[in-house]
Image (spheres, rainbow, N blue to C red):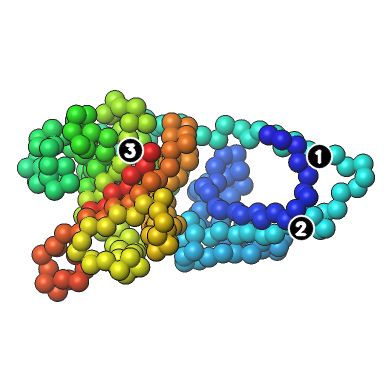
């Protein structure tokens, strides 16, 4: 890093993250020791920063910490340098990359499952016609709290067009199927990379796409799906790709909207930032694959698969 001093206007932007040790200890309940509610922590800290000149830029509900971004402008005249002041060289930040976890250490059980082989083959065929039966389904459970499936993945043989894709058919790890406190379980992005590296034996950099089947996540399904198609002026029953690198203003805006608002997109983006294995990798495109859900009452609201591509 180069030495610097404030010689021109700076804009400082803060985005909330997850509070971790050792700082989380001061937020724990003094009696029960219960982990802090991340939303409440973000609200308290946001109010503190607001008293110090930071302005909130809301990209969603006030209760959604992922969107509570704050910022302020710093002018050189506000902090004039004395003649004897020196430029400073900021210290290199500590290694803040996450470590890929072992699912078993967090109480998860990983099971190979072929019970829905025919159904999964039908599911994969439209986008990956060459896969056939060259895939393996994986179910994640938490035996200590019940037998329900927390997450379900499908990975395909290396030589197929889906060889570098991890498909997700169920994702319930933050719902009532896993009611453990957040600090006792993993987020979906941590489970994704753990499954890919530890269970399939593949290198993290081999993963270049994640496919979400029959999306029911409410923000993407009920809010953003139709909005993005309207922004792009496309028929909602046609496939749609949104690229990061594009000359289209509408496409740039739609891509940015998903990156900022869709939980799946936010999660994958954080995964690429949090793990050293994905250094210099970024999301390149989003793709929608609509299908007829078979409900005449919902003809204007089809189901869809959703793919995130990165490199």
Kindly tell me whether residue 86 is visible in this rendering. Answer: yes
Marks 1/3: CA distance?
Answer: 42 Å
Q: How packed is label 3: few (under 14 Cα within 10 Å), some, or many (20 or more)?
A: some
Q: In terms of sequence position, does the residue under pointer 2 or pointer 1 come before the other? A: 2
Asked if marks 2 and 3 touch (Cβ < 8 Å), the reply is no
What residue is at 82 percent from the left and 54 percent from the top?
A: 79
- Residue on which the image places disc 2: 75
Which element carries disc 3, helix, strand or loop? loop
Q: Please identify the residue farthest to the front as the structure is shown.
A: 247
Marks 2/3: CA distance?
Answer: 42 Å
Direction from residue 130 to residue 100 in the image, left or right: right
Image quadrant holding the C terminus, namely top left
Which element carries disc 1, helix, strand or loop? loop
In the rendered structure, find residue 64 and report the number of the disc placed on it.
none
Q: Position of residue 246 (x, y in %)?
A: 40, 53
Asked if marks 2 and 1 touch (Cβ < 8 Å), the reply is no
Direction from residue 307 to residue 278 in the image, left or right: right
- Residue on which the image places disc 3: 208
Which element carries disc 2, helix, strand or loop? loop
Q: In terms of sequence position, does the residue under pointer 1 or pointer 3 come before the other? A: 1
Q: Position of residue 70 (x, y in %)?
A: 60, 59
- Residue on which the image places disc 1: 87
Image quadrant holding the N terminus, namely top right
Q: Nearer the viewer, residue 248 or 93?
A: 248
Marks 2/1: CA distance?
Answer: 16 Å
Q: Nearer the viewer, residue 242 or 224?
A: 242
Q: Nearer the viewer, residue 261 or 29?
A: 261
Q: Please identify the residue farthest to the top as the structure is shown.
A: 201
Q: Position of residue 299 (x, y in %)?
A: 16, 71
**In the depicted structure, whether residue 163 falls above or below residue 282:** above
Q: In terms of sequence position, does the residue under pointer 2 or pointer 3 come before the other? A: 2
């Amino acid at each position: 890093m180069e030495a610097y001093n404030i010689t021109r206007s700076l804009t400082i932007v803060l985005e909330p993250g997850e509070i971790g040790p050792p700082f989380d200890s001061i937020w724990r309940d003094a009696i029960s020791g219960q982990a802090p509610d991340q939303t409440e922590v973000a609200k308290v800290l946001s109010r503190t920063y607001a008293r110090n000149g930071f302005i909130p830029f809301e990209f969603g509900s006030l209760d959604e910490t992922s969107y509570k971004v704050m910022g302020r402008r710093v002018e050189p005249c506000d902090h004039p340098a004395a003649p004897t002041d020196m430029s400073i060289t900021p210290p290199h930040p500590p290694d803040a990359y996450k470590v890929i976890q072992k699912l078993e250490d967090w109480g998860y059980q990983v099971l190979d499952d072929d019970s829905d082989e025919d159904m999964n083959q039908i599911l994969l065929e439209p986008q990956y016609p060459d896969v056939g039966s060259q895939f393996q389904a994986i179910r994640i459970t938490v035996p200590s709290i019940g037998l329900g499936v927390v997450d379900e993945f499908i990975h395909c043989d290396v030589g197929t067009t889906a060889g570098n894709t991890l498909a997700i058919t169920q994702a319930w790890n933050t719902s009532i199927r896993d009611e453990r406190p957040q600090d006792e379980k993993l987020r979906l992005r941590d489970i994704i990379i753990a499954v890919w590296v530890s269970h399939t034996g593949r290198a993290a950099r081999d993963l270049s796409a994640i496919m979400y089947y029959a999306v029911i996540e409410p923000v993407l399904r009920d809010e953003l799906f139709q909005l993005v198609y309207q922004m792009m002026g496309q028929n909602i029953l046609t496939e749609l790709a949104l690229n990061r690198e594009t000359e289209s203003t509408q496409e740039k805006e739609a891509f940015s909207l998903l990156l900022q608002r869709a939980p799946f997109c936010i999660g994958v983006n954080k995964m690429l930032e949090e793990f050293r294995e994905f250094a210099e990798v970024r999301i390149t495109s989003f793709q929608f694959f609509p299908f007829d859900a078979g409900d005449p009452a919902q003809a204007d609201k089809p189901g869809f698969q959703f793919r995130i591509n990165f490199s």
